[in-house]
Image (cartoon, coloured by chain):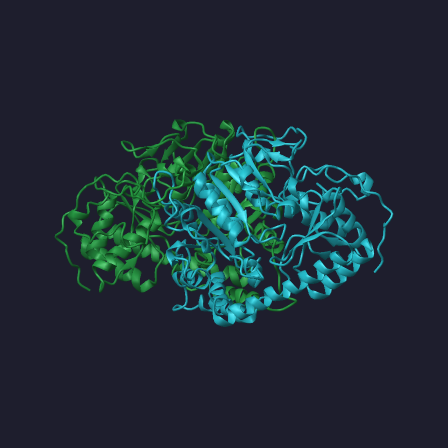
Chain colours: A cyan, B green
Amino acid sequence: MSLTHLSISFSSSSSAFLSSNSINSRTLKVAVPAKKNGICKCIATPPAETAAYKTKVSRNANMAKLQAGYLFPEIARRRAAHILKYPDAQVISLGIGDTTEPIPEVITSAMAQRSHSLSTLEGYSGYGAEQGEKKLRAAIASTFYADMGIEESDIFVSDGAKCDISRLQLLFGSNVTMAVQDPSYPAYVDSSVIMGQTGQFQKDIEKYGNIEYMRCSPENGFFPDLSTIQKTDIIFFCSPNNPTGSAATREQLTQLVRFAKENGSIIVYDSAYAMYISDDRPRSIFEIPGAKEVAIETTSFSKYAGFTGVRLGWTVVPKELLFSDGFPVAKDFNRIVCTCFNGASNIAQAGGLACLSPEGLKAMHEVVSFYKDNTKLIVDTFNSLGFKVYGGEHAPYVWVHFPGRSSWDVFAEILEKTHIVTTPGSGFGPGGEGFIRVSAFGHRGNVLEACKRFKLLYK
Amino acid sequence: MSLTHLSISFSSSSSAFLSSNSINSRTLKVAVPAKKNGICKCIATPPAETAAYKTKVSRNANMAKLQAGYLFPEIARRRAAHILKYPDAQVISLGIGDTTEPIPEVITSAMAQRSHSLSTLEGYSGYGAEQGEKKLRAAIASTFYADMGIEESDIFVSDGAKCDISRLQLLFGSNVTMAVQDPSYPAYVDSSVIMGQTGQFQKDIEKYGNIEYMRCSPENGFFPDLSTIQKTDIIFFCSPNNPTGSAATREQLTQLVRFAKENGSIIVYDSAYAMYISDDRPRSIFEIPGAKEVAIETTSFSKYAGFTGVRLGWTVVPKELLFSDGFPVAKDFNRIVCTCFNGASNIAQAGGLACLSPEGLKAMHEVVSFYKDNTKLIVDTFNSLGFKVYGGEHAPYVWVHFPGRSSWDVFAEILEKTHIVTTPGSGFGPGGEGFIRVSAFGHRGNVLEACKRFKLLYK
């Protein structure tokens, strides 16, 4: 494999989350990648005025606040543009965190069987409960929340955590305030903007108004200094964290629950990577005493069983969680789920049930284990090159520091010179500037090849 | 089968869409059905004050505006309560419009095959495009929109029309005004309330403030008198209509498009029952010249292929549709889909593609034809009993008039005396008062049995 264009220089443009000028295409000599190939239609600026008929409906001002495209379609777009430029390149994707390994057969067989049975009189079923099938809810409760006081009726099965995050935002409405880890998975901030909870994007500090950004950096061990954090209604908290790969300890989560209780806040705890935890750190926020009164947990089968395309997750809203007037949050969430959703696909739910059988659980652990071995290869590679490397131990993400450099520049440098797609840290918030997220989701051969290319580039 | 309790009298309570007192349980002697059985947690009034810890987060005021539960879970709850009361009754459900016939094997085989292939290296796929698989989008465009200028890129594949209605509301935001047919499928109004587009529920007229209710009744042939309708930003319009079963003619839809254009409104056209149309009425709003500049269309595989549980639908947002500032509506909808959704299940999409093969289309037409034969049986039954009966010709719903009576009373009378679940017309809006919707989704034997029981009750 030849590494071309090693001599190209990179502009050090500011990233502004994902502003369209964040890569200087002239310096990069990239053949105009953006708005012409039709892959991503998420752009921020309106097109030039034309004589076309216009309705009199005003564009939703919240939509107009959003900066450029949602991060991952944007990465996919840049990948596609790169392939156009280098049609023969062997591009390796360690970018959007997409699973690559086949789904264990014990799980796909159950889905195939459910599919077949839908063509029989006895096996056919129509609308299911919006909250999910009783058996699956019960299996989730007993598999993941035994001894935590979480019951079947607290579980809402869904088509994935990202979708539930938006439904939770609908539940909260536009009059709440929000805190997020900085950096964080972009769906929290973007859905908050869409719901109208935020102010405008402030270009100088690369933050939206009215969101509390809780900085998570190597200096604080990727856990925010809560004494400096403003009280908000809602606290989004992801652990093991996407993108930094760090996982909060029991003491840290105890602090977080206490902080929420003191402020009367609700934590939305995203535990989509919990099975990647290597030691006895909590897998669920509900391992922390008192959490049921302050927290919601949202998670997914995506990264355990390779369900990124099958679509299945769940959200736990404990009956103990109450609004200030004493109204149970779960009752309003149930109303949202009944009105705005119609349940996850029954075939995916059959797969979920198979995931929680003894064979299914064993198979999921093997999948997780495979990706964790990938992670180790990537961590060792960057360590050997002298980089400061974070994450990776409890999560399938490696967070590599490039001090003083723009994330988008490093992203572009790596893509251009090694044909490897990563994710620029600043795409996850201003606190991610200077970092690159390397995903461990990939075939072993590709990960080994990527490690070779990284060594060639940065030795 | 014995028809018991024929002599019970019914209170003529007002319905208030679905207020919790709409059936007088004492008069009905129903064993306290509501808040105790855990099936439906959607209730409007907060529980009694307790000493439990409360967060300081205020309940979303829009959620508090909603009247009682979403209609169909409410119907399911009442059905369950009835079964508790009469455990030996042979209950027949012609209520929530749930499909009952097996999915044609050509379709389930494709889904089973896709499931199996997900366990292979070559067949595995992770995250798909949020907008749906290219082949499916292309097949939808060519099957349903040939010669209408709708292209693959205008199609957004989804997990169903109900889910897309909420995503469209997110797109529009809280500062738009809304018109709906009265009666109409409750998801339009309820999602509008949740988004904060409406005022409070006005009990005296059984309407929410700031929604324009377009009355559709036998007097106007179930098409609103547009000369009396206030200009709104958005017009929800469902044809063939749920619940009235009427389908708008080409002339009526031409009027509607002209009306939208005069007012600068956007039509959200729900065509989920289009395949049930018996004559040459338009199957799509895009058959009307100029509609691409004023309309979105949302629809579903649910009622054609029995996909109510599999979950697959699509929404068409033509690139020609522009906000008042010229910004394309499709670009913002794409951003919503990318941020708040992760695509329909890949297995369901494989099923959708099979639906659109020549064999799949033939099989779907047979399913539709089966339900249409059911419809005819129900229409003939009520006609023979001297009722005024509407709908049924172009839709799987029969709309039966009980002049001067409360819908909920008739619903309860039918359930109590015949063990048949229907849907009270007033659950679809004040314009549905005095009507009952009878769904034609059912096994032939059950529909025949139901017709017998109707004849026994109303002869």
| Percent position of residue A48, x then y | 68, 30
| Percent position of residue A122, x then y | 38, 69
The answer to whether residue B25 is seen in the rendering is: yes
| Label total for image | 0
| Percent position of residue B157, x then y | 55, 50
Along the viewing direction, whichever of A253 and A145 lies nearer the viewer:
A253
Quarter of the rendering containing residue B430: top left
Along the viewing direction, whichever of A276 and B289 lies nearer the viewer:
A276
* B392 relative to B261, above or below: below
Which quadrant is the N terminus of chain B positioned in? bottom left
* B361 relative to B174, above or below: below
Along the viewing direction, whichever of B273 and A287 lies nearer the viewer:
A287
Residue at point 79%, 50% (across, down): A416
| Percent position of residue A387, x then y | 75, 52
Q: Is residue B224 left or right of residue B344?
A: left
Residue at point 79%, 44% (across, down): A31
Q: Is residue B336 left or right of residue B369?
A: right
Residue at point 68%, 64% (across, down): A443
* A129 relative to B291, above or below: below
Q: Is residue B134 left or right of residue B54?
A: right
The answer to whether residue A270 is seen in the rendering is: no
Q: Is residue A50 left or right of residue B364?
A: right
Quick one: which residue is furthest to the right in this view?
A7
